[in-house]
Amino acid sequence: MARSPKRRSHPRKRKLNPDAAGIDLGATRHYVAVPEDRDAQSVRHFGTHTDDLLALADWLQGCSINTVAMEATGVYWIPLFQILEDRGMEVYLVHARHVKHVPGRKTDVEDCQWLQYLHSVGLLNASFRPPAVICAMRSLMRHRRSLVQSGNEHLLRMQKALDQMNVQLHHAVTDITGETGQRILDAILSGQRDPRALAALRDYRCKKSEAQMAKALHGDWREEHLFTLKQSLQAWRFHRELIAQCEAQIQAQLLQIQSHSDEPAPPTPKTGANKPDPTQRELLFRKFGTDLTAVEGINLQTAMTLLSEVGNDMAKFPTAAHFTSWLGLCPDNRITGGRKLAAHTRNVNNRLATALRMAAQSFHRSQSYWGDWFRRLRAKLGAKAAITAAAHKLARVLYAMIKTRTPYNPAKLGNPELAKARKQRFLIKQAEALGYRLNPINSEVS
């Protein structure tokens, strides 16, 4: 006998909102609908200037509206959202796909009335939006990312100009924007053409000798490419200054976020190049109440991305499943008639999910539990699915740490004895396939 499908023990209750309004947003005009008993003209339209938005908020308050639903249309919703939120209203920012209009005529008036109806009967779910202080942090972090991308474009133009002159600076030094690279670029733009003189500017830590560097710096100098190189270098340095100013603003904004711990951060288990900056790590520890950088693959930049995109409080996500669903890292199961149609993840453009996927790629060569688990999963599912699964697991670990304010405990990730037995079985199987037999070494050496 077939087993009946599992039912929810606690069905989700729909919240009725009699004091709800719906807004259809536009570039030049917003259409607003309120319940018919609140005003003789229950549907009105307002302009998009600040005075018009304030008049819209006054009208909603006059109609005793305390909750509003609007679609996430471009960036048109941001000014109105902030004004209504400052007035104390509960604003639901909903996905356009979730409020698709019923078949038939589609107008702006019908759209706002449809939003108002769906919201009044509790059929809409609000999209996640962090508090205002986190939103400010998020705007600065995204702006910094844009500055880094723009600066990298000028860096590519510098490389192109050097290639066109056959100046192989990237073969002489590892980083053309390092100390040696910038000294050589400044000398080239100052008129120096002797490759030996340029190679003499090398730092003593450079692996290439002066003779090797001089051979790579012998170029076919052309004025048009030198002009391009000069402007690209100036633009790249200007972007570096902007990034430094933006980082200073980020630090100032970071101090305004509520702290969850006043204790000093514990010693970090990471060493060498993976060891995070102690000052920044200490500040993030106070904000989160736990050290996220202790998790393998999580660096300061990933922790800052989490803080700016979500915040340091997981109250808006009841469970880790809600959090991973918002990230788009969990399977989007579609089942009908007892048959699974699809189980792939949703196509979500989430910056934190991208950062976690990049962190998951570092498990490829890791010799820890994460590395063993990732390589085993990659052999079974493939690289793409393994990266998504590892990012999903990282998200659940970070969620638990922030939710409970507890330190990272790698012992909870798996059974060490079970992992050791699995490795032994694998090695024995590989040895037998090659015609060998493995014998254990006695623990006591005579």
Image (tube, rainbow, N blue to C red):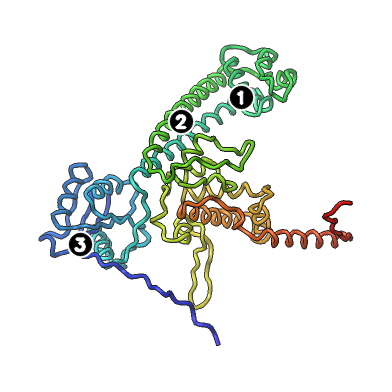
Q: Quadrant of the N terminus?
A: bottom right
Mark 3 crowd level (few <14, some 14–19, many ≥20, 10 Å Cα) = some
- Counting labels gives 3
On the image, the x and y values in percent for residue 290 come to: 49, 47
Is 105 or 214 nearer to us in this picture? 214
Is 442 or 108 nearer to us in this picture? 442
The amino acid marked with disc number 2 is Ile
Whole-number angstrom distance, CA of label 2 to CA of label 1? 25 Å
The amino acid marked with disc number 3 is Asp
Q: Where is mark 3, residue-wise? A: 19
Pointer 3 with pointer 1, Cβ within 8 A? no
Is 414 or 12 nearer to us in this picture? 414
Whole-number angstrom distance, CA of label 2 to CA of label 3? 46 Å
Picture residue at 72% right of the left edge, 24% below the top: 208
Whole-number angstrom distance, CA of label 3 to CA of label 1? 65 Å
Q: Where is mark 2, residue-wise? A: 243
* 2 or 1: mark nearer the eye: 2
Pointer 2 with pointer 1, Cβ within 8 A? no
Q: Which mark is residue 162?
A: 1
| Mark closest to the chain's N terminus, 3 or 1 | 3
